[in-house]
Every structure is written in structure tokens, then in C-alpha cells.
Amino acid sequence: MERRISMKREGFTLIELMIVVAIIAIIAAIAIPSLLTAKISGHEAAIIASLRTVSSTQEQYRARYGTYGGLTELSAQSFIDPVIGSGNKSGYTIAITFGVNTWTATAVPNVPGQTGVRGFMVDHSGVLRFTLDGSAPNTASPAID
């Protein structure tokens, strides 16, 4: 009795696997930068909204207490969210300088180019300004419409 050994091969060849890996790498190379850009845009939108909140609540705080407040004061009196009050939100560091008649809030990315690209500022005038390099803007910086 003779035995026949079947030489039927099952599975994928090395070249087939390499083609699949190459296709996945190409798709990832296209998709990852888009995802990072979307993440940065989301962080910037969140910071713009937070600075607008700070702007409106500063006037409410001043009406009640006679002076403007910093992040600690605004947060302690529940004028702003404690996350904003912590000074760190959405990959940005937020700071407020204030006096009796003026205040300025700035937000700069913790890691420029990764957590955000633009720096933002709003002051007692209510005009939101930005820089394209992630540095803190000033009153000469362009305004956001």
C-alpha cells in the first residue's frame, strides 16, 4: 500500500502579506496627519469657547465684586468651570492678569504644534486675538471675527 502525501499548501505567501502591510502603511500615512490636524482644531475651538466664557463672566464678576478676578476667584465663586479655573484645558495653559479696571486672559499651547498651533488672548475690550506661532498675543495681534 502506497501512501500519497498531499503537497497542497494553505495560507498566504510572504509577498501577499507584504502587499497588505504596504497598503495599511499607505492608508496610515494619509490618515494620521488628518487626525492630528482635527485634534488640534478641536483643542483650539475649545480654548476659544473657554476664553469667550471668561470674557463674559469677568463682567458678571465685576458687577458683583467691584473688580475683575483671576482664574482662582472666578472658579471659586462658580463663575467658570473648575477645569478652566485650573489653568490647563485642552492642551493649553490659561492665565489671567487683572486689576480693578482691566484684565487680560491668555492661552498658549502646552506643546506648540502638537496640542495647538495658535496662541489666544482676550481682554476687557472683549476682542479675541491670536498668533500663528503659539506665543501669547498682544493688542496688536489680529482679531478673530
Image (cartoon, rainbow, N blue to C red):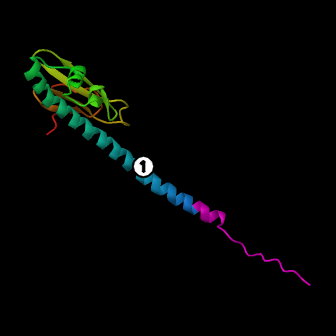
Residue 112, percent from left and from top: 35, 32
Q: Is residue 126 left or right of residue 94?
A: left
Is 137 part of what is drawn in magenta? no
Note whether 46 is above or below 54 in the view shown: below
Asked whether residue 124 appears in the rendered view, the answer is no
What residue is at 60 percent from the left and 60 percent from the top?
A: 18
Q: As rendered, which of 137 and 77 lies closer to the eye?
A: 77
Q: Where is residue 10, by image quadrant? A: bottom right
Q: Is residue 80 left or right of residue 124?
A: right
Residue position for label 1: 32
Per the picture, the main secondary structure of the magenta-coloured stretch is loop
Q: As rendered, which of 31 and 48 lies closer to the eye?
A: 48
Q: Where is residue 57, by image quadrant? A: top left
Which residues, given as a range, are shown in magenta?
1-18
What residue is at 38 percent from the left and 45 percent from the top?
A: 36
Q: Is residue 70 left or right of residue 22?
A: left
**Quadrant, the C terminus:** top left
Residue sitting farthest toward the front: 77
Asked whether residue 45 appears in the rendered view, the answer is yes
Identify the amino acid type marked 1: Ile
Note whether 102 is above or below 53 in the view shown: above
Q: As rendered, which of 58 and 13 lies closer to the eye?
A: 58
What residue is at 92 percent from the left and 84 percent from the top?
A: 1
Q: Secondary structure at mark 1?
A: helix
Note whether 93 is above or below 29 in the view shown: above
